[in-house]
Amino acid sequence: MFQIGPPRASWSAILPTAIILAVMVAVIPAAGFDNPAPPPEGPEGEGPGETETPGETESGAIHPDAVSVFLKRTYAARPKKLWKALVGELPSAGYPPEEVDEARRTVKTSFVDFDQENYAQPVAEMPPRFGGGYTILQMVKVKLGKVSIEGIVKPIEGGSELQLRARLLVQGLDRKRGIRVLTDRRSAGVIEGEFLARLESHQGLKRLQD
């Protein structure tokens, strides 16, 4: 009989191809293609790829343009008296001390929430310029955030000096890692100024000079 159509392939030709396909099917699951790793998740209550952790440059250091400067005031009071007034006023103003060094007369408070609506002037300066080693995008206007107060009392001739600054943490987007972060923002001095006015009023402190 005559064969109609193309000739059938022999088993000897098909068998090597079948073996290769079987090996590929066995290897692919082992490489993890059927079980891809789940997307990273942030803390409880946040979606995938989101987190809230202080972060700045790639090296982990705070960007220089995000570091707040100290406001300095000099008073006609002994360092011991001024120190006692400072440590006593912070918690009553809503800033509970967290790190207190009596010998050096330095104090840092815990972070607490702040709301821009409670202040007449912007509490934060412009964010650091995006680019280079700085990969965090921030909103120009700050509405909410966290703040910690740092205070230092030093003796001077005729009295003592108080150095005060606020460390602000605000929401930002780390474009490199694709996550939300709490990142540093330079204070405009508004929060520090209000606390100093409160301290002077409640403690009856007299300035030596402005």
Image: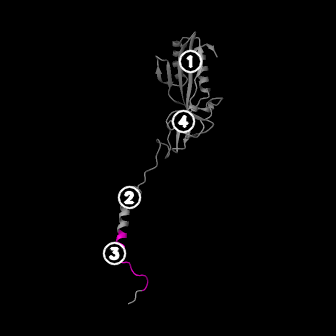
Q: Which label's residue is closer to the chain start, 1 or 2?
A: 2
State the image quarter where residue 140 is shown: top right
Is residue 114 visible in this depiction of the protein?
Answer: no
Indicate the position of residue 153 as horizontal and vertical percent values.
53, 17
Q: Which mark is residue 14?
A: none
Point 35% across, 63% down: residue: 23
Specify how the rendered protein is coloured. one colour
Indicate the position of residue 169 as horizontal and vertical percent values.
55, 33
Q: Which label's residue is closer to the chain start, 3 or 1?
A: 3
Task: Give the camera-side residue of 155 and 1.
Answer: 1
Point 38% across, 63% down: residue: 24
Q: Disc 3 residue type?
A: Ser
Q: CA distance from mark 4 to mark 3?
A: 67 Å
Q: CA distance from mark 4 to mark 2?
A: 41 Å
When the figure is inspected, residue 90 is found, relative to residue 35, above or below; the finding is above
Callout 2: few (<14), some (14-19), or many (20+) C-alpha neighbours within 10 Å? few
| Residue tagged 1 | 162
Q: Which label's residue is closer to the chain start, 2 or 3?
A: 3
Q: Which label's residue is closer to the chain start, 4 or 2?
A: 2
Callout 1: few (<14), some (14-19), or many (20+) C-alpha neighbours within 10 Å? many
* SS state under label 2: helix
Q: Disc 1 residue type?
A: Leu
Indicate the position of residue 36 as horizontal and vertical percent values.
43, 54
Q: Quadrant of the N terminus?
A: bottom left
Q: Which label's residue is closer to the chain start, 4 or 1?
A: 1
Identify the magenta region: 4-18
Question: Looking at this rendering, what residue extends furthest in the top direction?
Answer: 158
| Residue tagged 2 | 29
| Residue tagged 3 | 12
